[in-house]
Image (tube, helix red, strand yellow):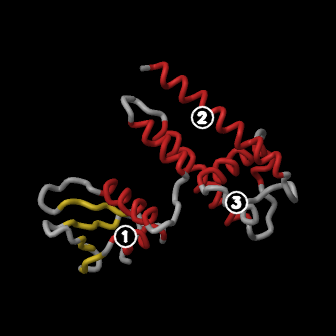
Amino acid sequence: MAETGKPLLIKRYASRRLYNTETSDYVTLEDIAKFIREGREVQIVDLKSGDNLTRQYLLQIIAEHESRGENVLPISVLTDLVRSYAGQSTSVVPQFLAASFEMLRDSQEKMINNLGGMPNPMVAVPGFEQMQKQQKAFLETMMGGWTPSSTMPTEEASEKPEDSTADIDDIKRQLADLQKKLSGLN
């Protein structure tokens, strides 16, 4: 790929075919998913109208993975997303998801940087352990119970399953409280 600093521009033609402007060839949704997995930002625009269709196509990629049995998001998360669209003009769900995934990206980057055997400087930050437990519980919920515990940096050699369950229950309670507050705003 030519330049990774700016988004890869994909143009959608009237025939609904997707055209990669960097390589001058047609691409599929799976090709676009591959570009994104490789860390590339993608922008998909309608050639005729100039409308940005990126969100629509990203949702379509997720839907196709779900239809093939690849459970990208747990039912409870999908349900909460649908609820967040139901009549609420200002939902906190998009901001919450964006912040959560930003935290995930930052943690992954720090984990990669710490693989060289260097001690984790974040351990000295007050509240780091609690934040790490909440993040792990969130990831477990988002991944439908699959836990990448062998890849997550922790100070404790092992964590008791009861602690993890308690963290998940705590997060569920906090989300329920948040939903009640949001419902009260209507």
SS label for mark 1: helix
Earlier-in-chain disc, 3 versus 1: 1
Mark earlier in primary sequence (3, 2): 3
The residue sitting at 16% across, 63% down in the picture is 47
Q: Residue at x 57, y 46 (%)?
A: 100
Q: Residue at horizontal 22%, vertical 66%? A: 11
Residues at discs 3 and 1 in contact (Cβ within 8 Å):
no
Q: Residues within 10 Å of mark 3 (few under 14, many from 20)?
A: some
- Badge 1: residue crowd in 10 Å (few <14, some 14–19, many ≥20): many
Quadrant where the N terminus sits is: bottom left
The amino acid sitting under disc 2 is Leu
Spot occupied by residue 117 in the image (x, y as percentages of width and height): 80, 68
Toward the viewer: 116 or 68?
68
Residue pointed to by mark 3: 147
The residue beneath circle 2 is: 175
Label 3 and label 1: CA atoms lie apart by 27 Å
**Element assignment for label 3:** loop
Callout 1 amino acid: Ile
Between disc 3 and disc 1, the foreground one is: 3
Circle 3: residue type: Thr
Circle 2 Cα neighbour tier, 10 Å, few/some/many (<14 / 14–19 / ≥20): few
Q: CA distance from mark 1 to mark 2?
A: 33 Å
In this rendering, position of residue 163 left or right of residue 182:
right
Q: Position of residue 94 (x, y in %)?
A: 46, 41
Q: What number of labels is visible? A: 3
Quarter that holds the C terminus: top left
Please indicate whether residue 85 sits to the left or right of residue 150 in the image. left
Q: SS class of the residue under badge 2?
A: helix
Rendered position, 124 above or below 91: below
Q: Residue at x 37, y 59 (%)?
A: 58
The residue where tag 1 is placed is 32
**Foreground mark, 1 or 2?**
2
